Amino acid sequence: MPQALTITQTPGKPGTVYYPLSITAVPTPSLDRPTQLLLRILTASLNHRDLFIRQHLYPGTSFSPVPLLADGCGLVVAAGAAPSAQSWLGKRVVINPGTGWRDDVHGPEEEEEKEEEGSHGSGRGARYRILGGTEENPNGTGQEYMAIEAGEVEEAPTHLADAEAAALPLTGLTAWRALMVKVGPAKLGTGTRLLVTGIGGGVALMALTFAVAMGTEVWVTSGSEDKIQRAVQLGARGGLSYREDGWEKKLLGLVRDGGNAATTRTPLFDAIVDGAGGDVVEKGAKILKPGGVIVSYGMTLGPKMPFLMQAVLKNIELKGSTMGSRREFQEMIEFVRQKEIKPVISRTVQGLDNIEAIDDLFEDMKKGNQFGKLVIEIARDDGTTTTTTTSGSKL
């Protein structure tokens, strides 16, 4: 029988428990609707939500036989009778990591429908379902075969290897919405300046890559000088460690010294894309132009973030941002295709049943060692399963 990567429930409190990985035998998914596809998953990649699920810090955590992981690249090996499904046969695809959000720029439509129904206790977001590891969605990419609606896939850009294609969906979509919807096109492109904090994570790297491709001047922060230098190789103008006291003032000095006077008259920034929270508003108020934007797609430093009067007086906007809609996913994939953008891969391991090596990927994430995405190679285009190995390999 096909295999799925799952977690096993063990006693422990949220935040202290760490559910062990397991391999579960599952039946080959059946195509219950004529619009469905059967994918042989080639590659799947990790996100921080997978770590939070193992720590029981994510709502609706589910256990075997629900597969983990939301990112994946697969080959369509069977299709329902509908022409919309049949047209995908034999194609290599990337998978939309969430369902229930079509094209509303403000948020998932199905959330609104759920609220209008007046259901109690479910809370906002009950109908928007992200793949992998929760009760809300029994599907996930951490398995050998997966059934999915034909409308939830895009053809994988031909310039991407399987591992790169699997590294793209969730982080790419999150970064795309943060930039194109929340920062907005007016603050991107030639003559604009963006700060991306915490470089090294998947979303931050995709935000850097997208913004550079648009012609934006991008600066970064990190706790690692090595990560800053690697970001410069990807197109960042420079950066500073957020561990330095007064880093925001030093950053303005760097910009002033290294900026192009012909195109930038001020060292201030148009926008910040941030996934940490903490004191980003306090720092941002000192480095942003009046009317600048802070886009927050996460708060790894804690669930609260003060908004200061200093930011109010500068008319700074703080905007929350999540993953994105099906339309935004399509737009992001097309941009990647046109610009031939490649996600950064930190490390890959071979074999879905290679629990020890996959656990090592999670350790990279726990320690913040990764620079880019962490990927599991599950199968090859020729249909063979990858051979289990005991260590990861870098692309």
Image: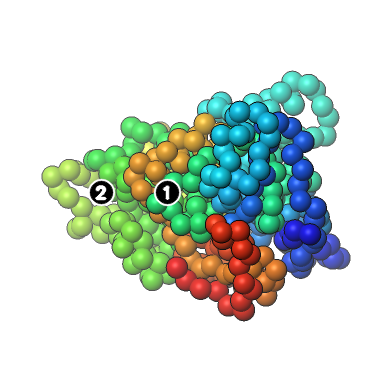
Per the image, the residue denoted by label 2 is 267
Return the residue nearer the eye: 382 or 180.
Answer: 382
What secondary structure is found at the residue carrying circle 2?
A: loop
Name the residue furthest left: 262
Q: Within 10 Å of the Cα at label 2, are there few (<14), some (14-19), or many (20+) other Cα atoms?
A: many
Front residue of 333/372: it is 333
> For the view shown, which residue lies furthest in the bottom direction?
390
Foreground of the two, 184 or 381: 381
Q: Position of residue 160 (x, y in %)?
A: 43, 53
- What is the C-alpha distance between the residues marked 2 and 1? 39 Å
Residue ID at (68%, 57%)? 144
Q: Is residue 215 left or right of residue 389?
A: left
Q: Quadrant of residue 179?
A: top left
- Which residue is painted at 20% across and 57% down in the image? 258
Q: Say the numbered circle drawn on residue 272.
A: none
Q: How is the image coloured?
A: rainbow
Which quadrant of the figure has residue 14? Answer: bottom right
Q: Is residue 15 left or right of residue 311?
A: right
At x 52%, y 31%, the residue is 327
Using a 10 Å C-alpha cutoff, classify the residue at mark 1 as few (fewer than 14 neighbours), some (14 to 19) or many (20 or more). Answer: few
Residue position marked by numbered label 1 in the rendering: 158
Disc tally is 2
For the residue marked with disc 1, what is the amino acid? Thr
Q: 68 or 255: which is nearer to us?
A: 68
Q: Position of residue 343 (x, y in %)?
A: 44, 55
Compared with 68, 99 (above or below) is: above
Question: In this rendering, does residue 381 appear at all?
Answer: yes
Residue at x 63% of width, y 47% of height: 77
Secondary structure found at label 1:
loop
Q: Quadrant of the C terminus?
A: bottom left
